[in-house]
Image: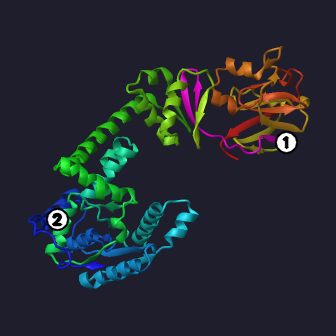
Amino acid sequence: MIISNLEFQISNSPMSHTLLHRFTEHVRVTFPQLQPAQAQLLLAVSGGIDSVAMVDLFAKAGYRFVIAHCNFQLRGAESERDEAFVRSLGDKYGCEVLVQKFDTADYATANKLSIQEAARTLRYNWFKEVLTAQLPNGLIATAHHGDDNIETLLMHFFRGTGIQGLTAIPAYNKDAKVIRPLLFAFREEIQAYVNNNSLQWVEDSSNASDKYARNFFRNKLIPAITEIYPQAKDNLLQNIERYKEVATLYVQSIALHKKKLIVNKGQEVHVPVLKLKKAVPLHTIAWEIIKPYNFSAAQTEELVKLLDAANGSYITSATHRIILNRNWLIITPLQHEEATNVLIETAQRTSFAKGRIDFELIAADKFHLSKDAAIASFDAAKIKFPLLLRKWKQGDYFYPLGMQKKKKLSKFFIDQKLSVIDKENVWVLEMDKKIIWVVGHRIDDRFKVGEDTKEVLNLKVVLGTA
């Protein structure tokens, strides 16, 4: 049903007379980049009272814009009615109207989303496409208002949230290029404005249903609260602004803690155990450290327990692992290795998961021993192909250069003070079931260059390239 001023009776509130002035001033202060003559605006318009008011306010404030309407095809004839109404706004305001129809129910089923999540995803993806194609420097404006903000705050609060959730709906999302210019106004102010300006709009019948959580807050909970605390909505809107400032301080404080605690080493992040254990508040700081690596809030307690666990203990997320290595926590991406056994049949360049190995044959009288751990030098006469390049495993042993007794690799790694991560990345080169080189660390003494060597076989490992 299309509703007009004659059909919707509301008191001729003086607040509606000042709404345009407040809107213009609010936009000027909150979005200084929006200048009426240059602004590129895409207004998201459902046809409801809030979006109709937003269109009229922008028009009266002197802005030019394009209207975008999503027909989610969820309410049959009512959806078609809404589309036709929004198209009519193009004639009224002399602007372009873009309409996109979506098979929302099918999309939700295919992507295992709720109808609301599916609609939101489809909506904003399309808006971004429109900006890219037609308004490259534009912004999307939605008609969320103060009551929406309060409802979001309460929904986050009861569902469970961090401090960011208490800031509710942001007025400006720079990454998404979305502005919300009506957050300063309450629903009754918008209704008074629409009434006093004889504007028409369409009513979504689903707004009256309490089956959606937001409608329950809107229609039941908040009215009940305001019966006891008449100023509750004003207070909550003011609290949101306070929470935004608290959130800013929170982010600044967390950044300082992380700067003191986090050491970046390539793809790994190292965190000193003793320093983290002294951090206050521990759980909050620990959560902020692990959150970017797809760990859940529930795993914060697991991380705290890891601080006192046995060396080598770890916890994992979908993408990362946190390992306790002596006095450090090491956050590292999960390994997705390629083939872990590479057969080398001739002395030619060979690629493997971590890089490659190059071969060079040198006459003994021209050989100079390198101190580079990435280069291994062997008596060529003692090396017989094929060779096997593989990851080390428990039980492996060799005769480290300079020693006449064998040593297990696990003990060798301890002596070399290798971290758990370092050990996981060690490869060995094997000949006839004998390890001739712990790649990048030490060769086997039995195959070293000696006084009787006539030719030297040099192997060089180059990491990070094929």
Q: Secondary structure at mark 1?
A: strand
Residue 105: percent from the left, percent from the top? 51, 69
Confirm whether the magenta stretch covers residue 1: no
Q: Closer to the camera, 276 or 104?
A: 104
* Label 1 Cα crowd, 10 Å radius (few <14 / some 14-19 / many 20+): some
Q: Which residues are magenta?
A: 322-345
**Residue at image mark 2:** 24
Residue 172: percent from the left, percent from the top? 30, 56
Identify the image quadrant of residue 357: top right
The residue that appears at 73% across and 18% down in the rendered structure is 411
For the residues bearing labels 2 and 1, Cβ distance under 8 angstroms: no
Identify the image quadrant of residue 427: top right
Residue 131 visible to the viewer:
yes
Outermost residue, left direction? 14
Residue 171 visible to the viewer:
no
Disc 1 residue type (three-letter): Leu
Residue 222: percent from the left, percent from the top? 26, 53
**Residue at image mark 1:** 343
Confirm whether the magenta stretch covers residue 336: yes
Q: Secondary structure at mark 2?
A: helix
**Residue 462 horizontal side relative to residue 138, left or right:** right
The residue that appears at 80% across and 37% down in the rendered structure is 389
Q: Closer to the camera, 432 or 314?
A: 314
